[in-house]
Every structure is written in structure tokens, then in C-alpha cells.
Amino acid sequence: MRNLILVAFVEAVADGLVFPRSDWPLHITLLRFDVEPSDGEDVAARLSELVSAPAMGALGAELTVGSDAGFGHQGSIPVSLVEHHPILQGLHEELFDAMESVGGRAATPRYVLDHYRPHISHHDGKRPEPGDAVVLDQIALVDMAPGGNHTIRRILKLWRLPAESE
């Protein structure tokens, strides 16, 4: 099984970035899922093709950070909710469809589609504040265990808004 995740990074990242699992840049989880490696086809490459149009179409959406909440066991993980936005919800749903089309399974099926709760986990003293504006300008496909190494993460594909000078 291969563990992948689609996220919208809130902090600047680079394509191909490798980082420790304990030191994620701030991000909004779009969809976490598992896929079976298929014979003769790179599932991540196929998924990247399917995700490109929805990801590029969502870039530039302006989101608003909402209230704080606690996720996980007994609410022990501090997060900032992201206020509902139709573009973000639509992106999540399109990513879900793409994931299913390559035979993937949502890692947390109770929190997808109508039950999707976009949020930014607080990390190492970093966190957004309620009311902060967040522009959806970096969407990434991340391998949760590149080469079977569960201690690191690797950005496999990064979609971003073009720089204004380009």
C-alpha cells in the first residue's frame, strides 16, 4: 500500500522538498488516501494528471481562517478551522473522484465529501489566527513514506500560482 496526501501548503515550499514527518510546513489537508501500486503504471503520475486541472482551477481562491478547535483523541490536536468556501469544497470532491478512479481509498472515510472539515494543524508554535486570509496558492501531492521510509515526507508534484513577474 502506498500512502499519499493532497494538501494546500500555507507556508512556502519547493517541488521535490523532503521533510521530516514531525516538521510539516503549515498546510490544509485536502485528502489523505492509500493506493495499491499498479503493474507497469506509476499511480502517483496518473493521479497527478487527473488532479492537474482541478488543482490549477482552484489556485487563487481566497480562504479565511475560522475558529480554533481540537481534533484527534479527546481534541488533543490544536487546529484552526478554515471557513467553508465552495471552491475548496469542490476541489476536495474532485480530488476524491480522482483518487477513487485510480483505485484509492480514503484514509479517514468519515471525514470526506459532506463531512470534510478543512483545517490547519498548529505546529511548533506556528499557527494562523482567526480571521487571517489564506490564498490557495500551492497545492501538492505528497508521499507519506517515500521509498518505504515513514520518517520523512516528499513532495511529488506541486501546483502553484505563477509568480507575478512571469
Image: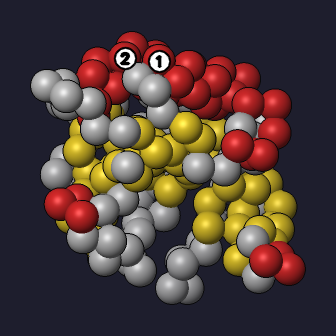
User: How is the model colour-coded?
Assistant: secondary structure
Tag shown at residue 65: none
**Residue at the location (19% across, 28% down)?**
39
Q: CA distance from mark 1 to mark 2?
A: 9 Å
Rendered location of residue 47, percent (x, y):
34, 26
| Amino acid type, mark 2 | Leu
Q: Choose between 57 and 134: the one closer to the eye.
A: 57
Residue 159 drawn above or below residue 72: above
Callout 1 secondary element: helix
- Mark 2 surroundings within 10 Å by alpha-carbon count, few (fewer than 14), some (14 through 19), many (20 or more): some
**Residue at the location (46% across, 26% down)?**
103
**Quadrant housing residue 159:** top left
**Residue at the location (76% across, 82% down)?**
76
Rendered location of residue 42, percent (x, y):
20, 31
**Quadrant housing residue 44:** top left
Residue 63 drawn above or below residue 131: above
Residue 17 as seen in the image, left or right of residue 80: left
Mark 1 or 2 closer to N-term?
2
Q: Choose between 8 and 4: the one closer to the eye.
A: 4
**Quadrant housing residue 93:** top right
Rendered location of residue 61, percent (x, y):
56, 29
- Residue at numbered disc 2: 50
Rendered location of residue 3, percent (x, y):
40, 52
